[in-house]
Image (tube, coloured by chain):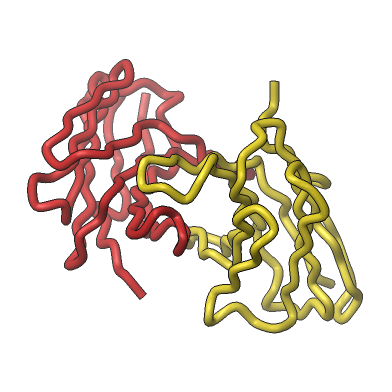
Amino acid sequence: DAMVIQNPRYQVTQFGKPVTLSCSQTLNHNVMYWYQQKSSQAPKLLFHYYDKDFNNEADTPDNFQSRRPNTSFCFLDIRSPGLGDAAMYLCATSRDRALQETQYFGPGTRLLVL
Amino acid sequence: GQQLNQSPQSMFIQEGEDVSMNCTSSSIFNTWLWYKQEPGEGPVLLIALYKAGELTSNGRLTAQFGITRKDSFLNISASIPSDVGIYFCAGLLRGGADGLTFGKGTHLIIQP
């Protein structure tokens, strides 16, 4: 019954080695978001897709990229992970960008950079 | 960016006690959401509020959207051990275009 699915739940990578995190949804929502959450902090928005329209937050490092090949899937690519990129990465979806729309989160992928 | 001030930062209570936490902002939000996050999991939506003054309940949880649209509170009545977790308020400014602005969370710890 999972609606927002993230794989893997835990990912270990090496410093500088590209890594891809994946998110899929069964809700057929138009909007998909990626958040970064560091320990004991609130989630921070990295970027979002409204359908195929990509929207980057101004302070998201260039090291972070995203792809959305279809409605159901969205990927987070970290081109050269640094130690500071170790965090929980949360995917969320909402039906639309209208004010009434709620965001639903996946379980997250915890990234460890060695 | 926009700031949400959430308090208290942590709460240590006895099982059965009532809990109250709140979020305030200098900005007007159009939607307020309350999430609970447990260790190693994503935030789970508890209550969504869409109108100023709205009071909504979900079981033992009650939340209100402040009249000024700059604040919201969450109450938990008769706390139980499974209420343990981090509670986040989150606000939405413009149709989700900017994503959610989160408070820093309230860490709830319950002593049996």
Residue at 76%, 62% in the rendered image: A76
Relative horizontal placement of residue A82, taking residue A49 as reference (left or right): right
In the rendered image, the quadrant that contains the C terminus of chain A is bottom right
* Residue name at image x 54 percent, y 81 percent: A59
Q: Quadrant of residue A104?
A: top right
Q: Residue furthest left?
A: B67
Question: Residue A83's spot in the image, x, y percent?
Answer: 74, 78
Count of numbered tags: 0
Left or right: A101 in relation to B3: right
Residue positioned 59% across, 44% down in the render: A93
Is residue B68 visible in the rendered image? The answer is yes
Residue nearest the viewer, comparing A34 with B87: A34
Q: Please identify the quarter of the rendering in which residue A68 is found.
A: bottom right
Residue A7, placed above or below residue A27: below
Residue at 63 percent across and 51 percent down: it is: A32
Q: Position of residue B87 (x, y in %)?
A: 38, 43
**Vertical position of residue B101 compared to residue B18: above or below:** below
Foreground residue among B55 and B110: B55
Residue B55 position (above or below residue A63) = above
Q: In the picture, which chain is red?
A: B
**Residue A73 point in image, percent of width and height:** 78, 47
Q: Nearer the viewer, residue B24 or B97?
A: B97
Chain A palette colour: yellow
Residue A71 in the image: x percent, y percent? 73, 45
Quarter holding the N terminus of chain A is: top right
Kindly give the residue lying farthest to the front in the view shown: A52
The answer to whether residue A9 is visible is: no
